Image (spheres, rainbow, N blue to C red):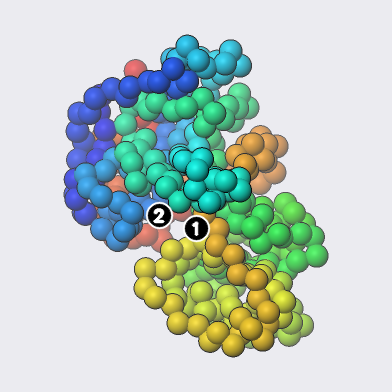
Amino acid sequence: MKALRLEQPGQVALVEVPEPQMGPEDVLVELRYVGLCGSDLNAYRGLSPMVTYPRIPGHEVGGVIVAKGPGVPDRVAIGSQVTASPYTNCGLCPACRVGRVNTCQFNQTMGVQRDGALTERIAVHYAKVYASSALSLQELALVEPLSVGYHAANRGRVCETDTVLVLGCGVIGLGVVTAAARKAARVLALDIDEGKLAQAAKLGAQETIDSATEDVPARVSALTRGEGVSVAIEAVGLPATYRLAVEVVAFAGRVVCIGYAKDEVAFATRLFVSKELEIFGSRNALHVFPSVIKMLEQRERPFANLISAVVPFDQAPGVFAEWDASPLRFTKILVERTHP
């Protein structure tokens, strides 16, 4: 079968790979749409320390179950439209032992530490697939990235009394915006791109901040009566935005870190102590796929507008170069594999 593979940084090729081998508790998912993630772009650029080459990328999927092993329960039906959780967990490490399997010490995310979904079919354990008859296959491909943002809002214990600043309005950040708004928090969205800020407003942000043109600390101060935000969620991965989150969060506030900063970040640690901050990492997603699917099924927001481009499978190698050259042009790219 065909697959799209990163041979080395900057080099993408369509190649032939073996059919997946199914275990007795696996289902065979025929891929119809695969979303491209920021981690895929970093892998293309050679900037991901977790990726080795060659590597088949892709972990945001919408597909159809076409076969299943003898150990798969009857409720998991052939013909179901599904997405899949792309993470693994060992069951033995400290994180797994306390039930936080999303941050398993030995996790291997599909398309990052192991080969991914930019191919024709994948074998997945039945417990990792989530079905919806109400969602389109394109919408199912949005579930995983929105779940990452939803999990970050949960990590920050966002609730209706909070004012939340979301730094970065890519799909992960927009997932945070949506989740925080759904929890009835007041949401401020920050980005350098007007189009992404407009999307944030449609997805629940009450205020938007253009950090390319505005004095962010002054604007946040004005919007919060000088107090700062109760929760700041960093979804960019830059030293400047990490420091900004700590600067504008309120005393006794919470900071949630999603973005992987590629450079070391220097902080004025007196702010950690004087504000008595709670600082949380947020990795992958934990037990929120069903909640996100329900949110999408209820058509609460115009989530389909997140999709910037849909490209045929055989044209996907070229879109990596376009994305690399103009990253602000795209919010979410879906690769479509036409059903024969």
The disc placed on residue 272 is none
Q: Residue 134 location, x and y as percent?
A: 63, 27
For residue 275, which quarter of the picture?
Answer: bottom right
Of 197 and 91, which appears nearest the observer?
91
Mark 2 vs 1, N-terminal side: 2
Left or right: residue 285 versus residue 40 is right
Q: Residue 10 location, x and y as percent?
A: 21, 54
- State the SS at label 1: loop
Q: Residue 205 location, x and y as percent?
A: 67, 61
- State the SS at label 2: helix
Q: Amino acid at mark 1?
A: Gly
Q: Amino acid at mark 2?
A: Gly
Which residue is the site of mark 1?
170
Q: Is residue 110 visible?
A: yes
Circle 2 Cα neighbour tier, 10 Å, few/some/many (<14 / 14–19 / ≥20): some
- Position of 318 relative to 233 (above/below): above
| Residue sitting at x 38%, y 20% | 22
| Residue sitting at x 64%, y 36% | 290
Left or right: residue 176 versus residue 64 is right
| Residue sitting at x 65%, y 71% | 278
Of 73 and 171, which appears nearest the observer?
73
For residue 303, which quarter of the picture?
Answer: top right
Question: The C terminus is located in which quarter?
Answer: top left
Of 132 and 155, which appears nearest the observer?
155
Which residue is the site of mark 2?
38
Left or right: residue 235 versus residue 278 is left
Disc 2 versus disc 1: distance between alpha carbons?
Answer: 9 Å
| Residue sitting at x 79%, y 60% | 160
- Position of 167 relative to 39 (above/below): below
Disc 2 + disc 1, Cβ < 8 Å: yes
Q: Residue 104 location, x and y as percent?
A: 49, 48
Circle 1 Cα neighbour tier, 10 Å, few/some/many (<14 / 14–19 / ≥20): many
